[in-house]
């Protein structure tokens, strides 16, 4: 019985921001945007005061009558005025007060309207919100959940980087060691992810448990190592990173546009890992 409770209690109580299904809604912008990428649909956002006693009239309008029929075509999300990251997110779309409705098109442009609306108002807003709309003012400091699109092949990553014109982030680590867990903690830091999110990502797991050095196309790498490769064949290397701020400094330097034809190597001063934040 105790073992069963141990399984059920975390499952029942753990919060989840992802609500799948045609009639369901998302409660955070990261999950909603991920669904947009998967489905190819547009994103409809209700921004309101979700605190007890808050005005939820707009949510009712969207979920009833003509509003619900049209909104069902979209990925749908409810953001809260009480949550500061949500306020920062909707501000990109010109919204400074709740309630408000935002429709973000697949081309990234948007239509938005503030104030209370009836179900008929919602239906007219959605019907008239055809792209292109207004261009958002993107805020790079909107908090994001770190989601790297890891490729397992260096050649594929470099080819994708060349096609997109973006640099490639390539992480080398030893399998069956603690390398990846420590690297993942560093790469998940918001300060790091903000700098690396737009790159093409590759993660190479090496069967090199007893090896400290790996001979790669980027030279002899002391493991674990992080490489940022540019489409002009230049690259920068950070070996044995020890802290997230070391990764931040490396990324800022590697992406500053001052790469030379020869590779630049930055080596962490101490050959051990420190806890993230130290």
Image (cartoon, rainbow, N blue to C red):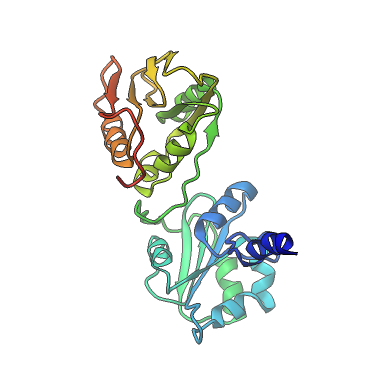
Single out the residue that lies furthest toward the right: 1
Q: Position of residue 222 (x, y in %)?
A: 37, 20
Q: Position of residue 112 (x, y in %)?
A: 46, 67
Single out the residue that lies furthest toward the bottom: 53
Q: Is residue 258 above or below residue 112?
A: above
Of 11 and 74, which appears nearest the observer? 11
Which quarter of the rendering shows the N terminus? bottom right
Asked if residue 231 lies left or right of residue 207, the reply is: left
Asked if residue 46 lies left or right of residue 74, the reply is: left
Task: Report the residue at 46% width, 17% height from top.
Answer: 211
Residue 212, picture quadrant: top left
Q: Is residue 176 above or below residue 243?
A: above
Q: Is residue 63 above or below residue 269?
A: below
Task: Report the residue at 47% width, 59% height from top.
Answer: 110
Q: Is residue 52 visible?
A: yes
Q: Is residue 21 visible?
A: no
């Amino acid at each position: 019985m105790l073992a069963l409770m141990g399984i059920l209690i975390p499952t029942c109580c753990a919060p989840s921001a992802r609500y799948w299904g045609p009639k369901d809604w998302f409660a955070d912008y990261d999950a909603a945007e991920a669904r947009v990428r998967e489905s190819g649909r547009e994103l409809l956002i209700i921004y309101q005061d979700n605190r007890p006693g808050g005005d939820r009239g707009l949510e009712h309008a969207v979920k009833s009558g003509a509003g619900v029929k049209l909104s069902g075509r979209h990925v749908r999300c409810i953001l809260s005025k009480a949550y500061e990251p949500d306020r920062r997110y909707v501000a990109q779309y010109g919204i400074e007060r709740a309630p408000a409705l935002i429709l973000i098109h697949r081309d990234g442009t948007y239509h938005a309207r503030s104030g209370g609306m009836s179900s008929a108002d919602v239906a007219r807003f959605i019907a008239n919100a055809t792209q292109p709309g207004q261009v958002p003012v993107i805020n790079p400091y909107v908090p994001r959940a770190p989601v790297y699109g890891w490729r397992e092949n260096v050649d594929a990553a470099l080819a994708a980087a060349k096609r997109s014109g973006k640099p490639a982030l390539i992480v080398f680590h030893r399998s069956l060691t603690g390398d990846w867990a420590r690297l993942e903690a560093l790469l998940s830091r918001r300060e790091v992810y903000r700098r690396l999110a737009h790159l093409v990502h590759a993660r190479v797991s090496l069967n090199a448990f007893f090896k400290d050095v790996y001979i790669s196309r980027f030279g002899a790498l002391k493991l674990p190592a992080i490489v940022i490769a540019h489409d002009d064949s230049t690259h920068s290397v950070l070996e044995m990173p020890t802290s997230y701020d070391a990764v931040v400094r490396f990324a800022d330097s590697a992406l500053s546009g001052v790469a030379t034809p020869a590779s630049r190597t930055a080596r962490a001063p101490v050959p051990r890992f420190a806890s993230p934040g130290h």
